[in-house]
Amino acid sequence: MIKKLMNFFKDEEGATMVEYGLMLALIAAVCVVTVTALGKSADSTFSTINAAL
């Protein structure tokens, strides 16, 4: 019984899954911020092009 508990506490599979989840959340947040920042710039650029046409 104690051996099974020790193996359970040494298992790092759950920690790895949490780390991957955190990395995915960070990447998603960076994508949202980037699209938001570039979206305003792109809108301005397209408005300028539209006015020139």
Image (cartoon, helix red, strand yellow):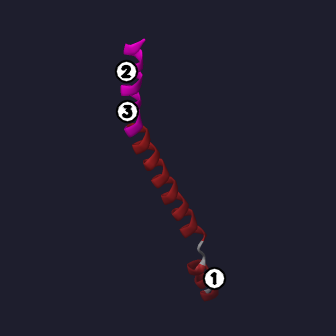
Question: Which image quarter is the N terminus in?
Answer: bottom right
Q: As displayed, is residue 31 above or below residue 53? A: below
Determine which of the numbered discs, if any, sits on residue 41 in the image.
3
Q: Residue beneath label 1, please?
A: 4
Residue 50 colored in magenta in the image = yes
Question: Secondary structure beneath disc 1?
Answer: helix
Determine which of the numbered discs, if any, sits on residue 13 in the image.
none
Question: Secondary structure beneath disc 2?
Answer: helix
Q: Earlier in the sequence, mark 3 or mark 1?
A: 1
Q: Residue drawn at (37%, 39%), measured in percent from left and top? A: 37
**As rendered, which of 17 and 47 lies closer to the eye?**
47
Q: Name the kind of residue labelled 2 in the image.
A: Thr
**As rendered, which of 51 and 10 lies closer to the eye?**
51
Q: Residues within 10 Å of mark 2 (few under 14, many from 20)?
A: few
Q: Residues within 10 Å of mark 3 (few under 14, many from 20)?
A: few
Q: For marks 2 and 3, give the one nearer the viewer.
A: 2
Question: Which image quarter is the C terminus in?
Answer: top left
Q: What whole-number distance in Å separates the C-alpha atoms at marks 2 and 1?
A: 67 Å
Q: Residue drawn at (52%, 54%), measured in percent from left and top? A: 24
Determine which of the numbered discs, if any, sits on residue 48 in the image.
2
Residue 2 colored in magenta in the image = no
Stretch in magenta? 37-53
